Image (cartoon, grey):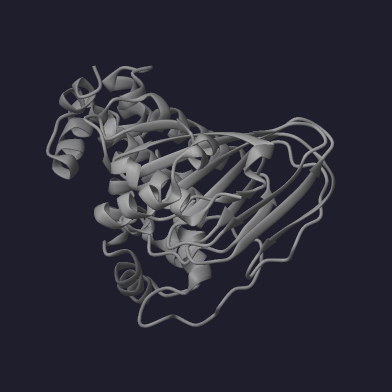
C-alpha cells in the first residue's frame, strides 16, 4: 500500500520546483525513508491525498500536476488484484481507457454499487468528500486515469451539487476530460487560462449528468431547484450559438418569466442573457486556445454574425480582444 507519508509527499511536491510541476513514478517514493517524508510534509504543509492503491507494486503509476491541477495514469497487467480507495475534499474523475475484470466491485457513498466486468471508455465521478472504493481481478491489461479537480475551481463555474456516478458513458465529458489531462501533462504555465476554461466547461458538462431522475419541485432559498438548474444550464450549453428566448427558458423551468428571472439570478449570479454570453465566451476561450480556427470562424461558430460584435463581447467579459487572448498561447 501507499503509506500516508508517501501520499503527503506526492501532493506536497506539487508546489516545489521552478516550474511548479511534477512527473514521477509514485511507487518509487516508498523507497524513501518514512521519517524524512513525514517531516518534509509537516514542514511544507499538506495538500489533498491521491488515490491509495493496494498493493502498490501491482501497478505502474505516473502523476503530473502544477498550478492546482493534477492527473495520474495507472496501468495494471492481466491477472492482477488491485484495490483503489479515496476520500478527500476534492472531486475525482476516473477515466477507464481499457480493461476488464473477472470479479470486483465499485462503490461510492450515495450511488448504487456496480460489479460490471467491462468498463472500457467508461467514466466514474466521485464528488468531494465521498468515500470511494474499487477493486478488480483483472482479465485484461487495464489502463485508467485519475483527474483531481478542486471544488473551488468548479464553484467559479456552477453552484450545482454534483452527484456520484459509476461507469457512465458521456462522450462530451470524456473529450473534455481527455483534453484537460493532455494540457496538464504537457502545457507550459502560460496556458493557465486554457486550463481554467477547460475546467469551467468540464464543470458544466458534469453538472448536466443526472442518473437519479429525481426532480425537486421546490425552489430552494429563492433560487431554482436542482433539476431546474440542470435542465436550463444543459439547454443553454446545447444552444450556445443560438438566440435563446426568456419564454423558452422559463418554460423549461415551469415558472413564470418574472419568477424565473429572479430565481435564475439567485442561482447563477447573473441574469439569463448575461449568463448565456458568459458561457459563449468560455467556449470561445477553448476554441481560440486550440488555434484550429480563425477568430472570425470562432465567432461564427458561437453565433456572432460579425467579428466586431464577437470582439466587443469577448473583451467586455475578459478584458482582452480574441486576438490578444490567442497570442497568450503562442
Which is nearer the eye, 57 or 123? 57
Q: Quadrant of the C terminus?
A: top left
Tally of numbered tags: 0
- Residue 105 percent across, percent down from the top left: 77, 56
- Residue 87 percent across, percent down from the top left: 53, 62
Residue 277 appears in the picture as rendered: yes
Asked which quadrant contains residue 108, the reply is: bottom right
156 sits to left or right of 35: left
- Write the residue at 31% across / 50% down: 40
Residue 244 appears in the picture as rendered: no
67 sits to left or right of 142: left
Does 102 appear above or below 78? below
- Write the residue at 41% across / 41% down: 70
Q: Residue furthest left?
A: 319
Which is nearer the eye, 158 or 178? 178
Q: Residue furthest right?
A: 102
Does 280 appear above or below 8? above
- Write the residue at 25% across / 33% down: 17
Which is nearer the eye, 105 or 270? 105
Which is nearer the eye, 148 or 209? 148
Does 298 appear above or below 119? above
- Residue 245 percent across, percent down from the top left: 38, 55
- Residue 68 percent across, percent down from the top left: 32, 45
197 sits to left or right of 323: right
Amino acid at each position: 500500500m501507499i503509506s500516508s507519508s508517501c501520499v503527503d509527499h506526492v501532493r506536497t511536491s506539487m508546489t516545489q520546483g521552478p516550474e511548479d510541476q511534477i512527473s514521477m513514478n509514485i511507487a518509487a517514493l516508498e523507497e524513501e525513508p518514512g521519517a524524512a517524508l513525514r517531516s518534509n510534509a509537516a514542514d511544507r504543509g499538506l495538500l489533498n491525498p491521491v488515490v491509495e492503491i493496494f498493493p502498490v507494486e501491482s501497478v505502474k503509476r505516473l502523476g503530473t500536476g502544477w498550478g492546482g491541477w493534477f492527473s495520474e495514469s495507472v496501468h495494471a497487467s492481466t491477472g492482477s488484484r488491485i484495490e483503489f480507495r479515496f476520500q478527500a475534499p476534492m472531486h475525482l474523475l476516473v477515466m477507464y481507457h481499457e480493461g476488464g475484470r473477472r470479479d470486483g466491485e465499485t462503490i461510492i457513498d450515495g450511488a448504487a454499487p456496480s460489479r460490471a466486468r467491462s468498463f472500457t471508455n467508461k467514466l466514474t465521478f466521485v464528488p468531494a468528500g465521498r468515500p470511494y472504493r474499487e477493486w478488480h481481478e483483472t482479465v485484461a491489461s487495464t489502463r485508467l486515469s485519475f483527474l483531481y479537480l478542486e471544488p473551488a475551481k468548479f464553484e467559479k463555474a456552477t453552484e450545482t451539487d454534483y452527484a456520484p456516478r459509476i461507469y457512465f458513458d458521456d462522450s462530451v465529458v470524456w473529450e473534455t476530460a481527455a483534453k484537460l489531462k493532455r494540457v496538464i501533462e504537457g502545457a507550459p504555465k502560460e496556458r493557465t487560462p486554457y486550463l481554467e476554461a477547460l475546467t469551467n466547461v468540464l464543470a458544466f458538462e458534469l453538472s448536466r449528468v443526472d442518473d437519479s431522475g429525481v426532480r425537486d419541485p421546490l425552489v430552494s432559498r429563492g433560487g431554482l431547484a436542482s433539476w431546474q438548474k440542470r435542465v436550463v444550464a444543459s439547454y443553454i450549453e446545447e444552444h450556445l450559438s443560438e438566440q435563446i428566448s426568456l419564454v423558452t427558458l422559463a418554460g423549461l423551468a415551469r415558472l413564470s418569466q418574472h419568477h424565473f428571472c429572479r430565481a435564475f439570478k439567485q442561482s447563477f449570479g447573473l441574469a439569463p442573457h448575461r449568463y448565456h454570453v458568459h458561457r459563449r465566451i468560455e467556449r470561445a476561450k477553448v476554441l481560440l486556445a486550440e488555434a484550429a480556427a480563425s477568430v472570425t470562424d470562432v465567432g461564427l461558430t458561437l453565433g456572432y454574425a460579425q467579428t466586431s460584435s464577437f470582439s466587443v463581447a469577448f473583451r467586455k467579459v475578459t478584458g482582452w480582444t480574441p486576438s490578444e487572448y490567442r497570442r497568450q498561447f503562442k
